[in-house]
Amino acid sequence: MQIEVRPATVFADVATMVGPKRPDANVCWCLSYRIPSKQNQELVGLRRGELVKQLVQEDPPPGVLAYDGDEVVGWAGVHPRADTTFARNRRIPSLDEREVWSVWCLRVRPGHRGEGISHPLLAGAVAFAFERGAEVVEGYPVDNRGEKVDLTMAYVGTRALFEAAGFTKAAETTSVLNGFPRLLMRLERPAP
């Protein structure tokens, strides 16, 4: 298996990864951290997908997709922190004014989980951010200490996944997900 990570510019592939089975269903579409809370609550049904269709046409698009050949198998939400709700999040601190990008969602398609796709997916999200000027990439994974994380809450990643990608713990947070504390982890842009 050769995983290739590309910018999320193909709406149908983004819909495969984060969209609902029924287009009018109110699922996340990976918007909950990407748009203001009020807008997220007001945006329902088909309008959620319509917004994502617009976002994939922007530069930068809202994330990256992982492919095994022509098949989409993974999604990562990654964008400048200033354009996300993390810019004002009271539970996850902002550490400085540098050009920080956030990775907030990692999703591997059912049928492909357990194949190690999350590692190249996270590496691709980091590369995407650095190629577009990020000085630092942050993630906010759970510190699950090796315990099982409920699949519906695993989208934030684990401390071990981020450490394997070279991230280090930068701060504690007051955010808790699935009973586990979330950490603020960072990876600095490599020196030229």
Image (cartoon, rainbow, N blue to C red):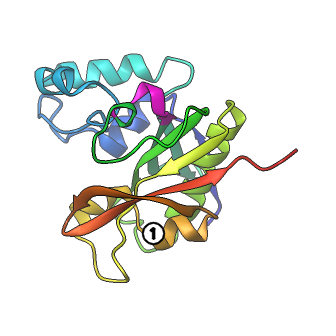
Image vertical order of residue 21 relative to residue 139, above or below: above
Name the image quarter holding the N terminus. bottom right
Kindly identify the amino acid type of the residue bearing the numbered disc 1: Arg
Residue at (17% x, 39% y) in the render: 27
Magenta residues span: 79-85
Q: From where the camera sits, is residue 62 visible?
A: no
Query: Relative to residue 48, is residue 77 drawn left or right?
Result: right
Of residues 100 and 94, the one nearer the viewer is 94
Question: Mark 1: which secondary structure?
Answer: helix
Residue at (12% x, 20% y) in the render: 42
Give coordinates of residue 153: x percent, y percent.
Answer: 25, 60
Instruction: Spot the residue most to the right.
Output: 192
Instruction: Spot the residue most to the bottom.
Output: 146
Give coordinates of residue 60: x percent, y percent.
Answer: 56, 24
Residue at (37% x, 37% y) in the render: 86
Q: From where the camera sits, is residue 188 visible?
A: yes
Q: Which residue is mark 1?
A: 159
Residue at (29% x, 66% y) in the render: 181
Image vertical order of residue 48 relative to residue 118, above or below: above
Query: Relative to residue 110, is residue 132 drawn left or right?
Result: right
Give coordinates of residue 30: x percent, y percent.
Answer: 31, 38
